[in-house]
Amino acid sequence: MERIYIQDIKNYLDKEVTLQGFVDKIRDLQYVQFLILRDRTGKVQITVEKNENNTVLNDILSNLTLESTVFIKGKVSLNEKVKLKGVEILPSKIAVTSTSLPELPFDYKSKDNSLRETRLDFRFIDLRREENILFFQCQTLFEHALREYYIRHGFMEIHSPKIAAKAAESGAEVFKFNYFGEEATLSQSPQFYKQMAMASGFDKIFEIGPAFRAENSHTSYHATEINMADVEISFIQSFADVMDVQEESFKYAFNRLKEVYGERIKEVFHVDISNTGVKFPRITFKEAKQILKEKYNYVSEREDDFERKEENLLCQYVKEKYQSDFVFITKFPFSARPFYHMLDEEGLTNSYDLLFKGVEITTGAQREHRYEILKKQMIEKEIDPKDLAFYLEFFKYGCPPHGGYGVGIARIMMQIFEIDNIREATFIYRGPTRLKP
């Protein structure tokens, strides 16, 4: 008899089933015992009367500890008095498959009464919470939906190396290590290899994989190991083509998320999936700075980029004016962008940031694919072309006009669910002070 999941229990009324899961609650009364069994799909009540026929089962339940795991074999029975789906299991067999210590390190069911650092120390217990299981089910669907969109539109998936010789972004902090006598780094972006794929004639590619940032940052939005969704497209006319692809793929993924989990997300997280029925507004960097000054009387010391407060205010403005949680900010100054972003006739980059609910979640651009101009822009950024000779090789033998973007999965997920810290939106968080578990 195969194990079934609790969510499907009503399909087996008056039939014998096998269940496995965690012991969520136990009530040991004078004449009856109740065990609440939990698996990742839900909870169900196991009912055992105290009588001579059930002495073995009674003894097991009397000595059982919460969070132990059990195997249950029994009959599914209707009982309108039972709060959990109106059904109960009348067991013929209970077997303890693992025993939990009587006291947990913290009460994982009461998130607000536990320190975050304690919960991260015992993340395997913290993840048992209903909202965490739902969150990572939604993340699975979100990534799958992106893959569905890309594959349906002719993209190829690549897996770029995570051991690299040089940094892909000038000024980026990288993890360095000895690689058989050579200095190597952990890749902080697949950028160079995405562009290599364009030079290889792959035309349209995507990758969902890890990246590593050695930034000693302790903010709510940064981590040293992240999961990225990256895209690169050949033969584009402008960076607007890149924005179009990102907008369409996001709308597809958000709609899939709403279709499958929308009601459960609202019930558990009290959040509505963002409206994707409106076009994502597009505002130039210069226009955005004017809006911040004229509408909010806010002028930042940072003239070539945005502070976090500015991103918040811009999203507030767009939400009020366009009813959108998304906004593309375009045409950033070259001083705030990498050497490989293409420049327009005014010296501004053909690039963009996508802001979502007050936070930047994407940087995208049309890349500079012309060898001599690319080399010139390296020098302007004080990068010696000899240091990136392997990268420049990609552009010597014909490379199509191309562009792309990268999305931090945990950051967009935390914004979808309005979670205030990336540590809560990462399976196992890595930061400057956290290397375990």
Image (tube, rainbow, N blue to C red):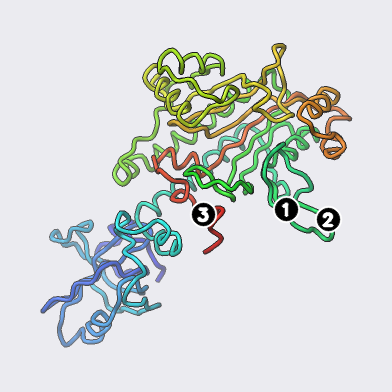
In front: mark 1 or mark 3?
A: 1
Judged left or right of residue 6, residue 290 is right
Where residue 307 appears, as percent x and y from the top left, is 51, 29
Residue named by callout 2: 182
Secondary structure at badge 2 equals strand
Q: Label 3 is placed on what type of residue? A: Tyr
Judged left or right of residue 27, residue 326 is right
Q: In which quarter of the image is the N terminus?
A: bottom left
Q: How many labels does the image show?
A: 3
Question: Camera-side residue: 196 or 113?
Answer: 113
Q: Label 1 is placed on what type of residue? A: Lys
- Relative vertical location of residue 329 with respect to residue 147 in this rendering, above or below: above
- Relative vertical location of residue 59 with respect to residue 81 in this rendering, above or below: below
Where residue 294 appears, as percent x and y from the top left, is 43, 12
Residue at left 36%, top 19%? 320
Residue at left 70%, top 44%? 158
Cα gap from disc 1 to disc 3, whole angstroms? 20 Å
Question: Camera-side residue: 6 or 242?
Answer: 242
Task: Please report contact status of discs 1 and 2: CB closer than 8 Å, yes or no.
Answer: no
**N-term-proximal mark, 1 vs 2:** 1
Q: Label 2 is placed on what type of residue? A: Glu
Secondary structure at badge 1 equals strand
Cα gap from disc 3 to disc 2, whole angstroms? 29 Å
**N-term-proximal mark, 3 vs 2:** 2
Residue 168 location, quadrant: top right
Residue at left 85%, top 34%? 385
Q: Residues within 10 Å of mark 3 (few under 14, many from 20)?
A: some
Where residue 71 appears, as percent x and y from the top left, is 36, 74
Task: Please report contact status of discs 3 and 2: CB closer than 8 Å, yes or no.
Answer: no
Residue named by callout 3: 429
Residue named by callout 1: 176
